[in-house]
Amino acid sequence: MSFDILRRAQRDGKPLALTIAVSGGHAMDGYLTDKCIGKTGLSPQAPNILHAVKCTNMLIADFIHKAEAEGLMANTVLVLQSDHLSAPSTVTDQLNRFERRNFFSLSGDGIRPSTYAGLSSVVDIFPTILDALGVPLPNGKAAFGVSLLGDRPTMVQALGQAQFDDAIYADDVLVRSFWQLKPARTAAASEAEPR
């Protein structure tokens, strides 16, 4: 479906934003598509989440290579990003041995290769994408973030990591709820719910 959308956009010459969200590496054990079974190169005994993440990476790479081969990446800004670190899973203990960061990259015509080494956060992604697309940003800002393509200090740089984290995690009940499994329903609770 995504290829059809890209082909139509190239043919029509109209601006387009296409967002493809992947869920292979989500949930406690990941979702491994049939397309990748036996093809990840990992041991069959490896946890399913590792197969699912590897599969997702393979499918994304295939998609990009195919789009490039068809000429569908001309006049295009490609954004690859994670939306959060891995939720608790069967490999959390292994992951926590490493420094973990969210991933964000831009590529396309006119975007020079570089690495942003300063402190930043996911609030800076939105203005950075707008900037890469050539959308004028007042003072390089949008919402709470700043474009990482410019030289303005980010919110986390201005506040400091501790104060920024305190602001983000202020509602710890809400934050913790994002990472917990849905509570099991009991027979009594199900019977009490209106139908």
Image (spheres, grey):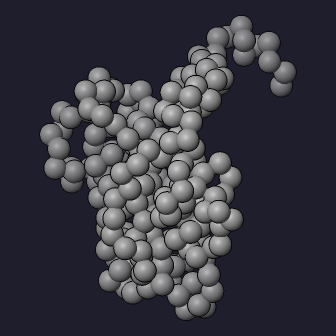
Locate the C terminus and report the quarter of the image it occupies.
top right
Compared across the picture, whether 10 is left or right of 57 comes to: right
Q: Look at the image and tell me whether residue 144 can be seen.
A: yes
* Residue at the image position 49 percent from the left and 60 percent from the top: 151
Q: Position of residue 154 (x, y in %)?
A: 54, 48
Compared across the picture, whether 23 is left or right of 126 comes to: left
Compared across the picture, whether 105 is left or right of 169 comes to: left
**Relative to 66, residue 14 above or below:** below
Q: Look at the image and tell me whether residue 19 can be seen.
A: no
Question: In the picture, residue 194 is in which quadrant?
Answer: top right
Seen from the viewer's position, the closer of residues 91 and 190 is 91
Compared across the picture, whether 137 is left or right of 48 comes to: right
Question: In the picture, residue 152 is in which quadrant?
Answer: bottom right
- Total labels drawn: 0
* Residue at the image position 30 percent from the left and 34 percent from the top: 99
Seen from the viewer's position, the closer of residues 43 and 71 is 71
Seen from the viewer's position, the closer of residues 47 and 79 is 79
Q: Residue furthest top?
A: 188
Seen from the viewer's position, the closer of residues 142 and 8 is 142
**Relative to 34, residue 174 above or below:** above
Q: Position of residue 175 (x, y in %)?
A: 59, 26
* Residue at the image position 64 percent from the left and 23 percent from the top: 170
Q: Residue furthest right?
A: 194
**Relative to 77, residue 35 above or below:** above
Q: Position of residue 55 (x, y in %)?
A: 31, 52
Q: Position of residue 173 (x, y in %)?
A: 64, 19
